Image (cartoon, rainbow, N blue to C red):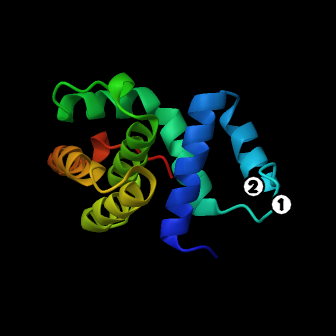
Amino acid sequence: MPSRRRSRESALQMIYQWGIGGGSPEKVVEDFFGGLAGDGPRPVDPFAERLFLGVTQEVRELDAIIQRHSSRWSPERMSTVIRDLLRLAIAELRWAKTPPRVVIDEALEIGRRFAGDDATAFLNGVLDAARREAESQPKAQRSATT
């Protein structure tokens, strides 16, 4: 079983692939785990798949959350990697049982790897605001994408 970080990175890569190439989410999962990248088939990672599919199902709502918490930066103006990482982390904050601090710390580490150190302050600010918003909502209003 892959580490949670590896699962999150896989989910981020699928979100990127889905956003750039289009196609159905199911086809993206099939292609990603089927080894079209040239490294042969690998077992499907259930956590990565659940994160990815959760983002695809809630992308408009996630983008609205990002818009509310990123002053003067619409999701369309952000780099693709930053936007997709925010979508991923906010989705996980909303429905996963992972402690919020862990979700944010993991997003910052993945952000460093895929977008550089300069991205972390922006990511942290948006994710912390999204965390506070999610915690202020009654549990029944939160999405249940599990």
Which of the pair 30/40 is nearer the observer? Answer: 40
Residue 54: image x %, image y %? 51, 44
Residue 143: image x %, image y %? 38, 42
For residue 15, what is the image quadrant? top right
Residue 127: image x %, image y %? 24, 49
Element marked by disc 1? loop
The residue positioned 20% from the left and 51% from the top of the image is 121
The residue positioned 20% from the left and 29% from the top of the image is 68
Q: Amino acid at mark 2?
A: Phe
Circles 1 and 2: CB atoms closer than 8 Å: yes
Crowdedness near tag 2: few (<14), some (14–19) or many (≥20) residues, C-alpha within 10 Å: many
Crowdedness near tag 1: few (<14), some (14–19) or many (≥20) residues, C-alpha within 10 Å: some
Q: CA distance from mark 1 to mark 2?
A: 6 Å
The residue positioned 55% from the left and 67% from the top of the image is 6
Which of the pair 137/22 is nearer the observer? Answer: 22
The residue positioned 41% from the left and 46% from the top of the image is 85
Residue 56: image x %, image y %? 54, 36
Q: Which residue is mark 2?
A: 33
Q: Amino acid at mark 1?
A: Pro
Element marked by disc 2? helix
Q: Earlier in the sequence, mark 1 or mark 2?
A: 2
Residue 41's label in the rendered image is 1
Number of numbered labels in the structure image: 2
- Tell me if 138 is positioned left or right of 43 in this view: left
Which of the pair 127/13 is nearer the observer? Answer: 13
